[in-house]
Image (cartoon, coloured by chain):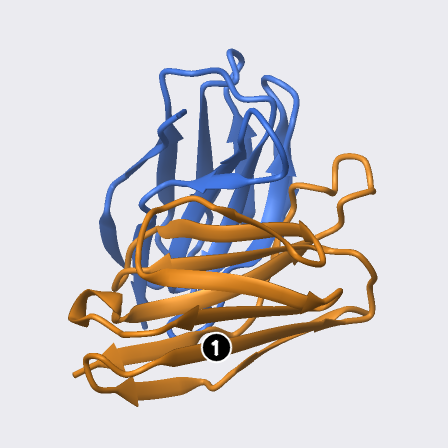
Amino acid sequence: SQTIHQWPATLVQPVGSPLSLECTVEGTSNPNLYWYRQAAGRGLQLLFYSVGIGQISSEVPQNLSASRPQDRQFILSSKKLLLSDSGFYLCAWSHPGVPRKAYEQYFGPGTRLTVT
Amino acid sequence: TQLLEQSPQFLSIQEGENLTVYCNSSSVFSSLQWYRQEPGEGPVLLVTVVTGGEVKKLKRLTFQFGDARKDSSLHITAAQPGDTGLYLCAHKGVAGNKLTFGGGTRVLVKP
């Protein structure tokens, strides 16, 4: 079966510090990968998605970036955090090649980021 | 961009009561999904509806896709405290496998 991991689970960082959040998927190959941010108690905002190694699409202009160095690894980064970067960050994956399943997404446990 | 509006934003009920939450748009969807998210965790897919008028049941949860495929509802019968969470609807974008999420309905079931 497939599993998705995110770490760290929680993170407190000062303004201006760098950020690196990691997401890995097990049990599948060539998944589509996604990074979302969620404000407290509200819906999800898609930040980045990737259909393959080195292929990143950005949905929202910001000071965050994403990379996919391996097939099942997705990293969210920032060089200098802003207060507004605080939130709950979720990684998700989907099957790209399974009809009608390609848009069903499976989420990791999330990372709670607080920028102080 | 097809926007999804969920209502109500918050719902508090007693255990054993029924509830319905709604997901609406002015656009037609090829499919729509419902997710439930518990505090501090990632959303979990509950169901995907594809056909206009489709009704799917998952134990005490009943999902309906509108005939015109512009809206959907989730009805919970005899709610239990374990049903507490944020209920999100989402639809597939025009291109690619991206999803657009509604703002969610927060449900609190009191024992």
- Foreground of the two, B54 or B29: B29
Relative side of A36 to A57, left or right: left
- Subunit ID for the residue under disc 1: A
* SS state under label 1: strand
Q: Residue at x 35, y 53 (%)?
A: B17
Q: Within the image, what quadrant is residue B7 found in?
A: top left
Q: Residue at x 37, y 62 (%)?
A: A64
Q: Which residue is most to the top?
A: B68
Relative side of B41 to A83, left or right: right
Instruction: Tell me where residue B81 appears, x and y as whole percent.
Output: 39, 69
Relative side of B38 to B8, left or right: right
Whether residue A68 is visible to the viewer of this picture, yes or no, is: yes
Q: Which hue belongs to chain B?
A: blue
Up-down: is A67 above or below A110? Answer: above
Q: Which hue belongs to chain A?
A: orange
Q: Specify the amino acid type for callout 1.
A: Leu
Up-down: is A8 above or below B22? Answer: below
Q: Which residue is mark 1?
A: A21
Up-down: is A82 above or below B4? Answer: below
Q: Residue at x 55, y 70 (%)?
A: A75
For the residue carrying disc 1, how many other residues have a C-alpha within 10 Å: few (<14), some (14-19), or many (20+)? many
- Foreground of the two, B75 or A112: A112
Instruction: Tell me where residue B95 appears, x and y as whole percent.
Output: 59, 28
Count every numbered label the image shows and give the total.
1
Whether residue B81 is visible to the viewer of this picture, yes or no, is: no
- Foreground of the two, A35 or A69: A69
- Foreground of the two, A69 or B102: A69
Looking at the rendering, in which quadrant would you find the C terminus of chain B? bottom left
